[in-house]
Image: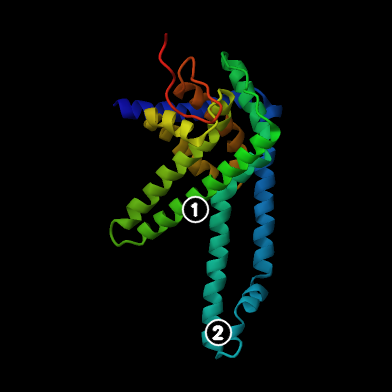
Amino acid sequence: MNSVHELLAGLGTLLRGFGLLLRRPRLFLLGALPALITSLLFLAVLITLIANLGGLITWATPFADGWDTPWQGLVRGALSLALLAGAVLIMVVAFTTVTLTLGAPIYDKIAEMVEEDLGGAPEAPEESLAASVARAIRQSIGMVLVSLTVTVCAFLIGLVPLVGWLIGPVLTAVMGGWLLGIELTASAFDRRGLLLVRDRRRFMGLRRMRVLGFAIPTYFLLAIPFVAVVVFPAATAGGTILARELLPAEPPRNTGLTSGPPPPAP
């Protein structure tokens, strides 16, 4: 029952995010812009790829020019499908990271608004722009690579007869939601000087069911084309609320160089 309560509390965190943003329609619409831009950008890339797919595959397979028509069509058709599926997979996996990167100032503003509404937010630690950008790029690349690995592994597991059709989607939802939670809580953790991904994982691990109750529904909503445009601002606000629930009242601070537990009280 405690696990069910935590799952429902996590879902409630997402709903609270919607409630906070709906009271500020301008900020809500502003927060939808990065997701809309990313969606349109990915759509343009996909259309361009489809329009040039035949020529690209022909250029990449000169060895098949002299083959008989059935074999040539079969090989090039299979490669076309594989390339298209791979492009769609990368877009799905990278959508959240790209959107958060493009809309970083907007989502930081949403997180700041949530912190002000709830009270007790500390001042953001000082960090040079170069260090902040380098850290963001490094963490974003790492998250995309991990997400791709999880997605491919879940797909391969899904091919296993009988049990694969169940385990694959469950693994995708749980791991995809967990990684999404890591990204959506970043702003609140950064504000408290907890700059490393392992800092977020450590506190999220203390209340896994609450994190999954928030992250899995958000993951599925963000996977629906263009629904993500509406969900993303609320998910950012919900991620900030979730981080505050995970962190102690007076969270430990560090410079990103260490990630250990807070020192004992004197």
Quadrant occupied by the C terminus? top left
Whether residue 133 is visible, yes or no, is yes
SS at circle 2: helix
The answer to whether 135 appears left or right of 196 in the picture is right
Query: Could you say which disc has been placed on residue 72 in the image?
Result: 2
Query: Could you say which disc has been placed on residue 148 in the image?
Result: 1
Quadrant occupied by the N terminus? top left
* Label 1 Cα neighbours within 10 Å, binned few <14 / some 14-19 / many ≥20: some
Report the amino acid beneath label 1. Leu
Q: Nearer the viewer, residue 251 or 82?
A: 251
The answer to whether 40 appears left or right of 182 in the picture is right
Work out whether 89 lies above or below 218: below
SS at circle 1: helix
Residue occupying image coordinates x 55% and y 91% = 68
Whether residue 227 is visible, yes or no, is no
* Label 2 Cα neighbours within 10 Å, binned few <14 / some 14-19 / many ≥20: some
Question: Which one is in front in this view, the residue at disc 1 or the one at disc 2?
Answer: 1
